[in-house]
Image: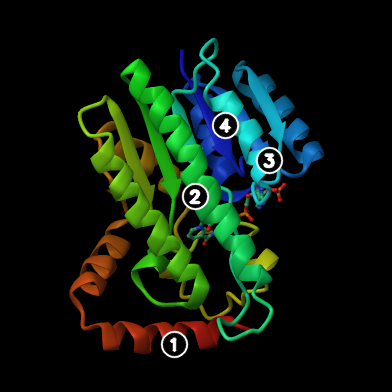
Amino acid sequence: MATALVTGGTSGIGATFARALAGRGDDLVLVARNSERLRTMATQLSRAYGVQVEVITADLADRTEVERVVSRITESEHPIDLLVNNAGFGIHSLLTNPDTSAHEHALDVMCRAVLILGGAAGRAMRDRGHGAIINVSSTAGFITMGGYSAVKAWVTTYTEGLAVELAGSGVTVTALCPGWVRTEFHQRAGIRTGKIPSLGWVDADVLVRDCLDDVDRGKVISIPTWRYKIAISLARVAPRGIIRAISGRLSASRHS
Ligand SMILES: NC(=O)c1ccc[n+]([C@@H]2O[C@H](COP(=O)([O-])OP(=O)(O)OC[C@H]3O[C@@H](n4cnc5c(N)ncnc54)[C@H](OP(=O)(O)O)[C@@H]3O)[C@@H](O)[C@H]2O)c1
């Protein structure tokens, strides 16, 4: 029997991971800020799938609260076999905004916490000779849409670095790079979605299913659906000037 720890497991992609993992019989540890949503999710999942669900209320922007999650990850009595570093949000702030707090908050939650939790899980899993880490990145990391792209480019590159460091240890590391997924993400960040073509949306269940298959295959970068695989392959070889021009148009269409 395996245990998975999912950050941001109460909504959107994290909640979809939680349901898929419970559905295959994994026990869960869910981490988020809202205790009531955590409790509701835990009750629903344990009733529906008969698995154990622990919850940790923690704000991953807070270094001390991240350490509480580290303590659970490194607990040897009840080991964590899969870490899903998923908690995150969009950034609706220009890079030239004199108030850099939104960007700093994003770095704390989507880079610093990912680094600390990923390192802790990597050490604990390496010592046991098995385990898997999924870092939820984004296709935005392959283009240049402001601070969010920079953060997600870091997540993808960090994942590859950790995968290199843990190669041969029995621990796999995977960056999941979704395109647009219908979750609370856009509303929370004040991002307009009206101009996103229907082909741009990826179903969360398909995303998670394909990602878990990629983890089983030991893939380091998981890009859901053929249309995104092709689009990102093109983006990786296209001149950067073209990528910047497309990114500028996409950014302009999304901000209200
Ligand atoms: N949706 C998309 O189109 C899309 C595309 C590419 C990548 N992603 C990435 O997918 C991940 C999940 O996003 P989502 O779309 O599922 O968004 P979502 O529906 O808004 O869910 C975000 C989750 O993260 C938790 N969270 C946010 N800030 C937190 C903090 N400071 N500490 C602890 N937990 C926190 C939230 O719970 P609380 O509010 O209770 O803390 C919630 O459970 C993010 O990393 C995002 O960048 C999303």
User: Taking the image as drawn, is residue 196 in sight?
Assistant: yes
Q: Callout 3: 10 Å neighbours few (<14), some, many (20+)?
A: few
| Residue linked to disc 1 | 248
Residue that appears at 51% across and 59% down = 181
What residue sits 65% from the left and 22% below the top? 53
**Relative to 255, residue 113 above or below:** above
Q: Contact, CB < 8 Å: mark 4 with mark 1?
A: no
Determine the CA span between mark 3 and mark 1.
37 Å
Question: Quick check: 82 above or below 37?
Answer: above
Query: How many tags in the picture?
Result: 4
Task: Give the residue type that dot 1 points to.
Answer: Gly
- Nearer the observer, disc 2 or disc 4? 4
Amino acid type, callout 3: Thr
Q: Position of residue 175 (x, y in %)?
A: 36, 49
Contact (Cβ within 8 Å) of mark 3 with mark 1: no
Q: Which residue is mark 3?
A: 64
Can you tell me whether the CB of the residue at mark 2 lies under 8 Å from the nearest atom of ligand 1? yes
Q: Which residue is mark 2?
A: 204
The single residue placed furthest to the top in the displayed view is 77
Q: Nearer the viewer, mark 4 or mark 1?
A: 4
Vertical side of 23 occupied by 240: above or below: below
Of callouts 3 and 2, which one flags the residue occurring earlier in the amino acid sequence? 3
Asked if residue 62 lies left or right of residue 251, the reply is: right
Work out how far the residue at label 2 is from the one at label 1, CA to CA, in angstroms: 26 Å
Q: Nearer the viewer, residue 16 or 120?
A: 120
Residue to which mark 4 is pinned: 70
Say whether disc 4 or disc 1 marks the residue closer to the N-terminus. Answer: 4
CA–CA distance between discs 2 and 4? Answer: 27 Å
Q: How many angstroms separate mark 3 from mark 4 (CA)?
A: 10 Å
Look at the numbered disc 2 and give the secondary structure of its residue: helix
Residue at 51%, 41% in the rendered image: 116
Question: For the residue carrying disc 2, how many other residues have a C-alpha within 10 Å: few (<14), some (14-19), or many (20+)?
Answer: many
